Structure formats: C-alpha cells, structure tokens
C-alpha cells in the first residue's frame, strides 16, 4: 500500500501539481471496528501472561506496537477503556461528543492543489499526532527531497518542542498558533507587558526595573538554567516592587513579581511574529484544505468507520483512502494542466 501511495504521489509531482513549499498537516478521528461492550477498564485487567500465538491478529499487532511512538509509547496515561477486539485503538471523544474507540488519520498535504504528500495512522492522543507530523516531514524529505518553506497547522501543533524542532532543526517557518498559557484573567500585567533583553538574559518590567534569574552571588554556586519542566524563572527585586506605584496592577498578592520563560521561547516568538503577517492569514485559509479532505474521506468515501483492525490494517486503509483521493485529484487536474501547457 505504501508503494502504491508513493507511486501516485510521485506522479502528482511529475505532473506539476506539487510545489512542496507550503505544506499543511492535521489529524482526524476515524472510528475503529470496536465497541464499548467488548472492552474493559484498567481495574478489570487480568495480570496474566498472554500467549501471542493464541490471540487474534489485532491483539498480536497491539503487543508488537507497545514500544512505538505512534502507538503504545505515545503516552504513559492509562486509557479509560481498552477494547478486547482492537486494543491499539483509543477510547476518545471529539469536541465533547460521545466517546468511542478510534484511530487518528494524519494527513500532510501540499496546499497548491491539496495533494496528500504523506499519511500516517496513529493512536488518537495528541503526542502521537505530533510525532506523526515529524515522521511525515522526515519521510517526505527522504523520499521526495521536499523541504517546505512553511508548515501550516492548528493550535494543537503549537507546542514548544515541536516549534523548536521546526525552526531550529528544520529551518521551516511555523504558520501555527502558539500554545500560550501566560494570559491572566484578573487584570494584572501579562507576560507580554514585560520586555525580554536577549543580550543580558533578563526581563524589563513596565516600571522599568529588571527581572533576573539569579541576583545573589552565592559562595557555593547554585545550579542555573531551566527547571525540570523546561521553564526559566525571572524575579524582580523585592525592594523595587515594594515602592512601585504599579504594584496593584502587577503583583498585588505577592511580595515581588515573577515571570516565567520557556526554554523554547525563541522559537515560540518566531511563530508569534508570523501570526501578525498577511501570509499567516492566507495560511489560515489554506489550512481548511486538509479539513475538506477529511470531510471528503468520511462523507463521500464513507470511511467514517474502519473495517480492518490493528495498526497494520488501519495503516492499509488510510493509505488506500489517501491514494484514492490523490488519484481523483490527478484525474481532475491533469487535463486542465495539459490544456494550459498546449495553450502556452
Ligand atoms: S511591581 Fe515590581 S515588577 Fe511590577 S512594575 Fe513595579 S517594579 Fe516592576
């Protein structure tokens, strides 16, 4: 299935339907062939050895993918229910709807003509979907030598580590909204009010005072750098805050103000700046093309519930569906392209 899929993508590239410059990625839930009635919560798991030869194929595949980043190793969180017939599927819900067993179809498309450049099946958890994006980008570079100028995705992909990987390691502009929890609801100054001084590694507050990571010169040097959570902490001097007229709007309940900074903040700032550009507004519209492909997949191709079980079966079904969608695109666009060439 993979070979067939790549052959069709290669033909799309040959026909000039792909520029490889603006790619978009997204994931969509597709119901697994599994029911709630035939499942167990963790409290009912039996801790008995399983003979892999005596269980169905889907269970064997589940056991074989326990260490894969796209499946068993995606998250340490125990699922609420595990299906007996397809244990690799994930008990999940979309947009606060009813929960069901599902897999995620991950698509990466070229936005020129919405050709699917890569497809990946994963467990329906965020970490697995982010990993799928990296896998697809790497594979597209290796297979078709495509390294895009920009990557378009929704907020779910705006995590620090992924933005860092895109900006620093791959040199790709992230047209992705940043996941930012620094906003405040009590009316006090948000972090955006504080200016970061890159050269001296400190923040300057609205009152013009400096917030630093370390102030005192300890006789026994203390460890510097981020905490285990990847967050750097900058503090104002208590004496500065005590006599400050802005204290009521800055840190009314604390002796001095503290501002946190992610170790990935430089890459997050790159993504933030991009969101202010006209190109980003265009990218937001282009992102809809992946959603339209998922709508087509479910409504027209009727792949709203999988027929095959286990990671391999699901991979095959997703590859077959993506191949069909690309072939449809070829049939629709090649006559137009050929005509344009003849006219030229
Ligand atoms: S309270 Fe402290 S941190 Fe806040 S503006 Fe005043 S001096 Fe700056």
Image (cartoon, grey):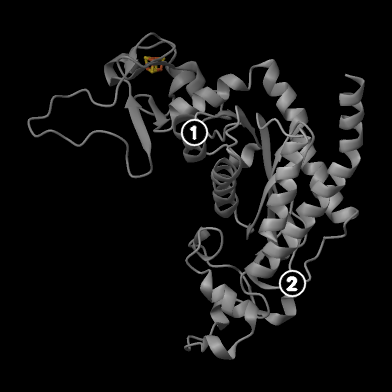
Q: Secondary structure at mark 1?
A: loop
Note whether 116 is above or below 16 in the view shown.
Answer: below
Q: Position of residue 324 (x, y in %)?
A: 82, 53
Q: Position of residue 60 (x, y in %)?
A: 57, 79
Q: Position of residue 296 (x, y in %)?
A: 86, 49
Q: Foreground residue, 218 or 125?
A: 125
Q: Position of residue 331 (x, y in %)?
A: 89, 44
Q: Residue at x 60, y 87 (%)?
A: 55
Name the mark on residue 308.
2
Residue farthest toward the top in the current orientation of the protein: 208
Note whether 217 is above or below 326 in the view shown.
Answer: above
Determine whether, in the image, residue 336 is placed left or right of residue 148. right
Q: Residue at x 48, y 28 (%)?
A: 267
Image quarter where ligand 1 lies = top left
Name the mark on residue 170.
1
Q: Residue at x 57, y 47 (%)?
A: 139
Q: Residues within 10 Å of mark 1 (few under 14, many from 20)?
A: some
Q: How many marks?
A: 2
Q: Is residue 189 visible?
A: no
Query: How far is disc 2 from disc 1 in space, using C-alphas?
Result: 35 Å
Q: Foreground residue, 177 or 185?
A: 177
Q: Is residue 181 visible?
A: yes
């Amino acid at each position: 299935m993979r070979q067939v899929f790549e052959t069709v993508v290669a033909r799309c590239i040959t026909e000039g339907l792909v520029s490889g410059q603006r790619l978009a990625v997204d994931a969509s839930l597709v119901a697994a062939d599994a029911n709630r009635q035939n499942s167990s919560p963790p409290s009912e798991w039996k801790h008995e050895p399983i003979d892999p030869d005596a269980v169905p194929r889907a269970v064997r595949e589940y056991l074989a993918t326990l260490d894969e980043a796209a499946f068993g190793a995606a998250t340490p969180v125990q699922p609420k229910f595990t299906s007996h017939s397809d244990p690799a599927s994930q008990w999940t819900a979309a947009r606060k709807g009813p929960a069901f067993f599902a897999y995620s179809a991950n698509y990466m498309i070229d936005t020129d003509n919405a050709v699917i450049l890569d497809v990946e099946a994963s467990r329906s958890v965020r970490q697995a979907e982010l990993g799928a994006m990296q896998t697809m980008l790497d594979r597209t570079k290796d297979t078709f030598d495509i390294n895009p100028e920009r990557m378009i995705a929704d907020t779910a992909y705006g995590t620090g580590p992924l933005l860092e990987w895109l900006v620093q390691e791959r040199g790709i502009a992230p047209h992705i909204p940043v996941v930012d929890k620094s906003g405040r609801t009590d009316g006090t100054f948000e972090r955006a009010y504080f200016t970061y001084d890159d050269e001296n590694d400190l923040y300057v507050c609205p009152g013009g005072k400096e917030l630093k990571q370390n102030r005192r010169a300890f006789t026994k040097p203390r460890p510097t750098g981020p905490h285990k959570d990847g967050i750097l902490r900058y503090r104002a001097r208590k004496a500065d805050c005590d006599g400050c007229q802005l204290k009521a709007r800055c840190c009314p309940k604390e002796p001095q103000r503290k501002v946190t900074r992610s170790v990935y903040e430089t890459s997050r700032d790159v993504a933030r700046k991009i969101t202010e550009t006209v190109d980003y507004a265009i990218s937001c519209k282009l992102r809809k093309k992946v959603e339209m492909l998922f709508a087509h997949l479910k409504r027209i191709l009727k792949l709203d519930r999988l027929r095959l079980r286990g990671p391999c079966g699901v991979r095959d079904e997703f590859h077959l569906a993506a191949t069909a969608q690309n072939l449809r695109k070829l049939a629709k666009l090649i006559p137009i392209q050929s005509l344009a060439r003849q006219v030229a």
